Amino acid sequence: MKRFSCACGQAVFFHNRGCTHCGARLGFDPRRLDLLTLTAPGDGTWTDGQASYRDCRNALEHANCNWLVHADDPDDYCVSCRLNRTIPNLSSAPSREYWDKIEVAKRRLIYSLLDLGLPVLGQTRGWPHGLAFDLVEDQRSNPTVSEEHVPIHHAGGIITINVAEADDVIRAMTRKQMNERYRTLLGHFRHESAHYYFDRLVYEPATLDSCRALFGDERADYEATLADYYAQGPAPDWTERHISAYASAHPAEDWAETWAHYLHLRDCLETAAAYRLVPLESGGFDDLLDTWLAFSVAFNELNRSMGLADAYPFVIPPPVADKLRFVHDLLAAGGIQ
Ligand SMILES: [Zn+2]
Ligand SMILES: [Zn+2]
Ligand SMILES: [Zn+2]
């Protein structure tokens, strides 16, 4: 993430709606990817002196969005909120709190996608191959709903996120049950976005061949392969070839875990560079990875100094580096359909 400051000089952050020092209103412009200090001309709009904006409808109705809508955009919702097809029932206090956490993670994903130059178009806004989100509760987070268990998944551009994942206790218990090293809302968003962008980015025959040589054939029987994985667990040597145990479940999951990991690395390195903890990214993928591997040691040591779990509980063996390089090169080539 970039580093932002208010017009008064105070450090401000991606999620902020106001400056704690001078009280100015802040808003994030998803076109300029910048957090702006705003003034109100008095006609119901906001301006930073360069452009005119409206509040996102979720800011007006629920005070849970700090992204701006350009005055020339006819949509009531910002580019992140307009992707929602289903939101939780807000009649219970926890659902409301969970929804807020989910939107924070979602905006972080959308920031990365926009920063990478990827198209972020709403399926509910007339883009048949666009993206949409169903943020769905099941009985773990809301006993009044009928669904017992909603799986997190992607199908045809619709990403379903289980609202229970915003409950820290439920998520920690699930992480323990699944024997995972890392489980976050942001990780879920990044992982599911991979399934969506696979079809958009990996379609040329030569690209598909290279992808399958690294990850395996994504046409392998999904249900049967996943059933085997859950019955028998990951292969004992998965750490030599995959970024996570789940990545070994199926080639499509390997792709998704690797893509999510690439987004983790990019965001962390952008943040570290913004605070001058690492050099600004200048070289290719190998330089990026070297910088990351050196920094991640310090990152973990800082967490251990606070008695916390490792911030980066991963190891990147050479085959995983090759997969991450494939994602890096694919995004750099920009051949989106
Ligand atoms: Zn300020
Ligand atoms: Zn919004
Ligand atoms: Zn997946």
Image (tube, rainbow, N blue to C red):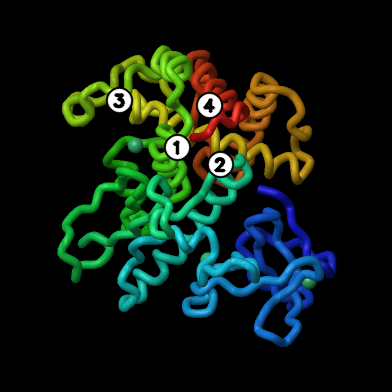
Q: Disc 3 and disc 1: Cα gap in Å?
A: 17 Å
SS label for mark 4: helix
148, above or below 294, in the image:
below
Q: Are marks 2 and 3 in contact (CB under 8 Å)?
A: no
Return the disc, 4 or 3, that comes first in the chain's sequence. 3
Q: Position of residue 54 (x, y in %)?
A: 62, 74
Q: Position of residue 60 (x, y in %)?
A: 53, 79
Q: Are marks 4 and 2 in contact (CB under 8 Å)?
A: no
Viewer-side residue, 248 vs 41: 41
SS label for mark 2: loop
Return the disc, 4 or 2, that comes first in the chain's sequence. 2
120, above or below 270, in the image:
below
Mark 3 or 1: in front is 1
Q: Which residue is mark 4?
A: 327
Q: Disc 2 and disc 3: Cα gap in Å?
A: 25 Å
Residue 118 marker: 2
Amino acid type, label 4: Val
Q: Position of residue 89 (x, y in %)?
A: 31, 72
Mark 4 or 2: in front is 2
Q: Disc 1 and disc 4: Cα gap in Å?
A: 11 Å
SS label for mark 3: loop
Horizontal side, residue 279 vs residue 320: left or right = right
Q: Are marks 1 and 4 in contact (CB under 8 Å)?
A: no
Residue furthest right as drawn:
8
Residue 197 marker: 1
Q: Quadrant of ligand 1?
A: bottom right
Viewer-side residue, 217 vs 324: 217
Horizontal side, residue 165 vs residue 263: left or right = left
Amino acid type, label 2: Leu
Mark 2 or 3: in front is 2
Amino acid type, label 1: Tyr
